[in-house]
Image: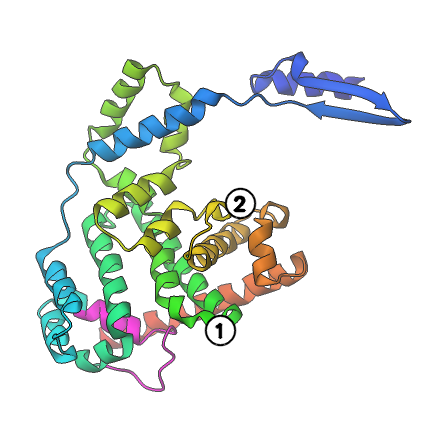
Amino acid sequence: GLGLVILVLMLKKIGLDEECFDIRAENGETLARITVPVEATRIESLSKLTDEIVRQITSLPHFPDNIVAVQKLLADPKSEMVDIARHISTDPAMTADLLKLVNSAQFMLPKRVDNIVDAVKLVGLKGIRNQLYSYGAQKLLGDDTDTKKKLWDHSYRTAYYAYNLVKNFKPAKRHILDDAYVGGMLHDMGKIVFSTVHPDLLDRIRAFCGEKDIPVQTFEDIAGGMNHAEIGARIAEKWNFPESLVAAIRFHHEPGLMTTDFKDVVFAVYLANAFCEFENGAMTWDQLEPLVVQDYGFQGEAQFRKIVEQFSEGFNKETRRLAGESGKKA
């Protein structure tokens, strides 16, 4: 009896009344049911608010000219690798990032590469193209706050996991390795964009909520990241990202909605992000998307946990290695 009283009080605390709780006896069993009403207008409100956020982000510039120039070279069938490498070398930061990528565990080279021409050849045209999207987004969005730094740290880990998930579990689909890696890097771009825009945006969004009679809770959902995937995808489309990366950003929390040719990329990014959330205690085995679990052939929580631990150990080892090399160069 006391348990039922406590349960009803808890329901009231989250805004539900007694009518949402039903208990009855059927065929010798006691059945309890809690009904949580879904506000149909909530989804519509989220969509409206997302549109407004994207529309309001007028301060985000286009990609830097040096990146656009390299993209044009990549699109020109007459371009030579040497020409592309020479153009990249005019940007020290871009050169350093490309060399860092080539010398990471992603390529598993027997010795360090310090020549930008060799690096370009190793990464390949598609790899360079994808890295430009990642590099450009990071430069434009920055890492000047603790929130952004944490988000980028999470993104690096997700990218590593996504790449290695494809490499180890989908050897026949190595052609999506680059997409999986960059998709992992940019999957939370919506959160970063939200924290990057001009200072008065939040006030303007709140005003918009008042004008359109959108519940304050909807705004809080957005601020907390509930709809960040769609925001990130809209920005990716604005920046003319490839469809595969847009899909990875848009569906990294809802892989079951992806039915196109980009399903493999979306599944890899979703699972990589799930690895991170599982590590942090933010997700349980039971919450994983069954379609993805089946696609990767996981047999149970014990196996899944072991794989997550192995990936985490690999990422931490790689992070220490890169930090050590940076220290030696300094």
Residue 282: numbered disc: 2
Q: Is residue 8 above or below residue 104?
A: above
Decide if residue 197 is in sight here. yes
Crowd rating for badge 1 (residues with CA inside 10 Å; few <14, some 14–19, many 20+): few
**Quadrant of image for the N terminus:** top right
Q: State the SS at label 1.
A: helix
- Which residue, as the protein is rendered here, is positioned at the far bottom? 110
Crowd rating for badge 2 (residues with CA inside 10 Å; few <14, some 14–19, many 20+): few
Determine the image quadrant of residue 77. Answer: bottom left
Q: Nearer the viewer, residue 327 or 109?
A: 109
297 relative position to 72: left or right:
right
Q: Residue at x 14, y 45 (%)?
A: 61
Residue carrying label 1? 171
| Relative image position of residue 207 (x, y in whole percent) | 26, 18
Find the magenta span and give its range. Answer: 95-113
Q: Residue at x 63, y 13 (%)?
A: 17
Q: Is residue 32 above or below residue 163?
A: above
